[in-house]
Image: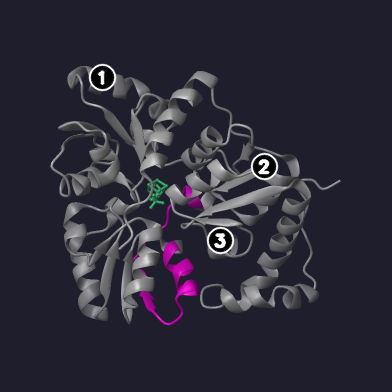
Amino acid sequence: MITSEFRPAWTPELEDQYSDLITRVGTTVPCLEWPLHLPWVDAINRLKRYRRAVVMAHSYQSPEIFHGVADVTGDSLALAQAAADCDADFIVMCGVHFMAETAKILAPDRIVLIPDLEAGCSLAASITADDVHQLRALHPGAPVVSYVNTSAAVKAASDACCTSANAVQVVEAMGTDKVIFIPDQYLGRHVASRTEVELVLWEGRCEVHEQFTAQQVRHTRERFDAQVVAHPECSPEVLAEADFVGSTTAMASWLRKEQPTRVALVTECSMADNLRNQFPAIEIIKPCNLCPHMKRITLPNIHACLTELRHAVEIPRAVAISARAALHRMLSVGRRDEP
Ligand code: 13P
Ligand code: SF4
């Protein structure tokens, strides 16, 4: 029997078997690391076929996960859409907890597993369903749009969800002059700058993106003569310095379209690594920060999760029904942030 203490062994044949992967990811995973990663990559790939499982990885996952074992990759909207369409027996979410919850809400008949239950998010932790009820009482009649970076209970207390890829369109689809937009105040301020709708904001922030400063970005641009692309969870001062602001998938689309010589990516570190592999001709500078929650997901804990079928995400039925309605409202709007 395979247990969580299992350690797959390195064999020289693995290097031949995965030569395509090694070449593709060669710009970010040094060859010295492959003897460590490949045994896990191979064991996970075999196990996921045996389990009829799909591995989904957010753009912030480490390259050996993103390129080595994921069947579906993308931003949180792309992962939510993929979960809604998925017919595998198991979904392994290599992202943070709210992403696994979103997958479970949209795919209630699938078993959704997350390799580490502690993979949280500072935005999701910043607000509760009770806070949402209090906001509604303070602003009667204003609908609530919640960023997907929220718990299932907060989604259930919302009228619609959004991601950074479609926040403006979801806010406008509410059809009101005023919307309560939670919990990311920086994304909220970015959305407010692009719509006539009045937004009531919450004080949440992403602990990773709030660390970037405008001075850092100006310095990077001058030093490297680089264009700047930033995630809308950064502060307004940082976003004002950027040539393009978009979700993680929109950043990739922008690179594909613009083909800049050199670009600085103001977001989570692994995103830059993953894009380097997709765009080897573009020089990608990474003035980046690590998301400690995303980094709780590792090849060994993905393997353990598939072996022991741990940790299955469960959501109370009534919460799931209301949260699903809010997510469906978002999915009906779709993706609108392509450059
Ligand atoms: P995306 O919606 O762009 O995937 O971002 C999710 C996230 O957690 C960014 O910090
Ligand atoms: Fe949450 Fe920020 Fe990590 Fe994204 S990068 S999961 S918003 S803490």
Q: Residues within 10 Å of mark 3 (few under 14, many from 20)?
A: many
**Residue 334 pos. (x, y %):** 38, 46
Q: Residues within 10 Å of mark 2 (few under 14, many from 20)?
A: many
Q: CA distance from mark 3 to mark 1?
A: 40 Å
Q: How is the image coloured?
A: one colour
**Residue 329 pos. (x, y %):** 38, 35
Type of residue at label 1?
A: Gln
Could you say which is closer to the camera, residue 288 or residue 141?
141
Q: Which residue is mark 2?
A: 90
Could you say which is closer to the camera, residue 188 or residue 270?
188
Quadrant of the rendered image containing residue 122: top left
Q: Which residue is mark 3?
A: 66
CB under 8 Å between discs 1 and 2: no
Q: Which residues are magenta?
A: 271-294
User: What residue sits 39% from the left and 72% below the top?
Assistant: 256
Q: Where is 12 relative to 162, above or below?
A: below
Quadrant of the rendered image containing residue 16: bottom right
Left or right for 232, reference 272: left
Type of residue at label 2?
A: Phe
User: What residue sits 33% from the left and 28% below the top?
Assistant: 159
**Residue 137 pos. (x, y %):** 22, 17
> Which sits earlier in the primary sequence, circle 1 or circle 2?
2
CB under 8 Å between discs 3 and 1: no
User: What residue sits 26% from the left and 69% below the top?
Assistant: 228
Determine the secondary structure under disc 2.
strand
Q: Where is 281 relative to 248, above or below?
A: below
Q: Nearer the viewer, mark 3 or mark 2?
A: 2
Query: Is residue 261 part of the magenta span, yes or no?
Result: no
Q: Which residue is mark 1?
A: 134
Type of residue at label 3?
A: Phe
